[in-house]
Image (cartoon, grey):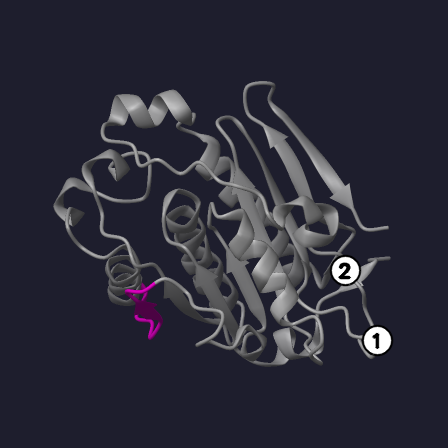
């Protein structure tokens, strides 16, 4: 028996997904979403509609480390990746060349919000924005260091009327609020790889893919994420209490 069952509207309708950040992990997650979408549509599901946000352009240190190619240099990450997926898979997904604004956008409009950002305070603010709302949106957060990372599926809202409670990354890590990030851009591939192992983003995206696939294909989950360390080859699941 599953401890968390896939929401009924996920099984009956097209799943509306907001992907925030199309960088290292986000570009890998977006590629994974396209593969899952194609597979489930082949199985008779309505599939996904994805809207992706990122205000950054592809730079040389991104090539190889992220899902970009030399010909992508100078193009916006969200628009470029979405256009590629739409062309290859015949989709109508949307890429927005801006950073996601909590004030201007409504996270609760989506069935699933996926955050692939490296700003701790943004994740804390996102959690707080829906706490007082009647919101059934699921939130899949990804985060990583040089060789470690976590993927946590939870709810944006813990409103009393919600039938299912699923703690979010902010419930597990309230220290995100007020945390100071060190996000100095890398100027070269060598510098980038000195601060982050090459396989970490793909490893994080694979866990996210497992969770989303389980919801769509199996109808539920007994786990809601994992902590990874690719130098140890370890993946510790976060079981649903």
Magenta region, residue range: 89-98
Front tag of 1 and 2: 1
| Residue 84 percent across, percent down from the top left | 25, 60
User: Can residue 160 be seen in this snapshot?
Assistant: yes
Relative to residue 22, is residue 105 depicted above or below?
below
> Which element carries disc 1, helix, strand or loop?
loop
> Which element carries disc 2, helix, strand or loop?
loop
Tell me, for residue 166, which label it has, or none.
2
Locate residue 101: give its quadrant. Answer: bottom left
Q: Give the dominant element type of the magenta stretch: helix, strand or loop.
A: loop
Which residue occupies 46% across, 50% down?
Answer: 117
Which residue occupies 40% across, 25% down?
Answer: 195
Instruction: Please check the rendered image and state whether residue 217 is part of the magenta-colored stretch, yes or no.
Output: no
Neighbor class of circle 2 (other Cα within 10 Å; few <14, some 14-19, many 20+) is: many
Which residue is nearer to you in this view: 155 or 40? 155
User: Can residue 216 be seen in this snapshot?
Assistant: no
Instruction: Please check the rendered image and state whether residue 96 is part of the magenta-colored stretch, yes or no.
Output: yes
Q: State left or right for residue 239 relative to residue 103.
A: right
Quarter of the image where the N terminus is located: bottom right
Locate residue 109: give its quadrant. Answer: bottom right
Q: State left or right for residue 34 relative to residue 126.
A: left
Q: State left or right for residue 102 relative to residue 168.
A: left
Which residue occupies 75% across, 42% down?
Answer: 238
Tell me, for residue 160, which label it has, or none.
1
């Amino acid at each position: 028996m599953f401890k968390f069952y896939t929401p009924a509207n996920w099984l009956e309708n097209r799943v509306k997904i907001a992907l925030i950040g199309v960088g290292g992990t986000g570009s890998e997650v977006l590629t994974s979403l396209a593969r899952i979408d194609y597979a489930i549509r082949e199985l008779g599901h309505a599939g996904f509609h994805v809207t992706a946000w990122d205000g950054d352009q592809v730079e040389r240190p991104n090539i190889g480390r992220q899902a970009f190619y030399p010909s992508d240099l100078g193009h916006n990450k969200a628009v470029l990746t979405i256009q590629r997926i739409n062309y290859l898979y015949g989709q109508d997904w949307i890429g927005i060349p801006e950073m996601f604004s909590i004030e201007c956008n409504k996270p609760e409009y989506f069935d699933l919000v996926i955050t692939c950002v490296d700003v701790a305070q943004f994740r804390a603010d996102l959690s707080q924005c829906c706490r007082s709302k009647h919101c059934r949106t699921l939130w899949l957060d990804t985060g990583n260091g040089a060789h470690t990372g976590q993927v946590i599926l939870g709810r944006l809202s813990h409103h009393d009327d919600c039938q299912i409670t699923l703690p979010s990354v902010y419930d597990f890590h309230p220290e995100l609020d007020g945390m100071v990030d060190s996000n100095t851009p890398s100027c070269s591939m060598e510098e980038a790889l000195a601060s982050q192992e090459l396989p970490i983003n793909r490893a994080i995206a694979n866990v996210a893919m497992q969770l989303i696939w389980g919801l769509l294909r199996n109808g539920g989950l007994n786990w809601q994420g994992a902590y990874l360390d690719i130098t140890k080859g370890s993946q510790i699941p976060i079981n649903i209490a």
